[in-house]
Image: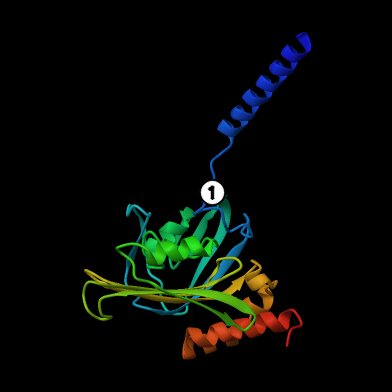
Amino acid sequence: MEKNARRSVVLVLFLISFVLMAYDAPAVNAADSSNASIRSGQSARWLVMASSNVNATWTTETYIPRGNYSAPVGSTINFTVTSVVGGRPRGVISIGNLVLTNVSMAETSVSLILGVYPFDSGLICPTNWDVQKQNATDNEFNNFTVEESKIGEIETVTFKYLSGILGNPYTYGTTVVYDKATGLLIHGYGYAYYVHEFMIDVALVSTNIDVGSVQSNRQALGATYVVVEIATIFGAAALITIFAVVLRRSTGGK
């Protein structure tokens, strides 16, 4: 009898401790549990291929202004990850004459028109692609088209959205191409025409993130002005093709 009572006490204590551990465990949001390959200290740089070059306002995801910037053709956007919160990176961004800290991906989505809520993808998109596709297509506001393809050795996911007609007021559009493995933006185009016409077209030129599961060669990508000149003349498609070739050759591929 005493032995059974002791067993009951042990069982009760075990159940209590199990409940407490479950209660204390942080909840994981399925929509955010991604970007496992993105770490603090990693960085990326995008070349501005085309731009309306207007004096634009950078805002938070709730549209609180943080500063003004301009991003002329040939300038770069630089982002360095300083933390990963809820599975999504935050960090320091420099764009034109503006430098900001603790910048979220939702901010980059709103300020550069790289996504439309709730698909607020920005410069680095979560890699739970089923959830992201649902955010981009399965709601009353968005009618994105989604495509998966390969650029050289890089598997990509492309999201396209357009509401209105380019060049006309009250038009909003974006095209974003992401590396499927990491969620890093390979090419992004954002357009909005409300009070003023805003447009920006950017392409990735260097990173120390393992793009497409291939270790990128920062020196090969970042130091060659030929890549930048060709990209400026022929557009983002040429730059993306060159980027894939450089990655393949830098790792001994053919």
The location of residue 179, given as percent across then percent down, is 57, 72
Image-quadrant location for residue 242: bottom right
Q: In this view, does 2 lie to the left or right of 209?
A: right
Residue ID at (28%, 80%): 166
Residue ID at (73%, 88%): 254
Q: Is residue 227 left or right of residue 250?
A: left
Where 11 sits versus 244, above or below?
above
Image-quadrant location for residue 145: bottom left
The location of residue 50, given as percent across then percent down, is 41, 80
Q: Who is closer to the viewer here, 145 or 123? A: 145
Image-quadrant location for residue 195: bottom left
Q: Who is closer to the viewer here, 60 or 3? A: 3
The location of residue 89, given as percent across then percent down, is 54, 55
Q: Who is closer to the viewer here, 110 or 197? A: 110
Where 8 sits versus 250, above or below?
above
The location of residue 236, given as percent across then percent down, is 49, 83
Residue found farthest to the front: 1
Circle 1 SS class: strand
Is residue 22 at least partly visible in the picture? yes
Is residue 190 at least partly visible in the picture? no
How many labels were placed on the picture?
A: 1
Residue pointed to by mark 1: 85
Amino acid type, label 1 = Val
Q: Who is closer to the viewer here, 4 or 165? A: 4
For the N terminus, the image quarter is top right
Residue found farthest to the top: 2
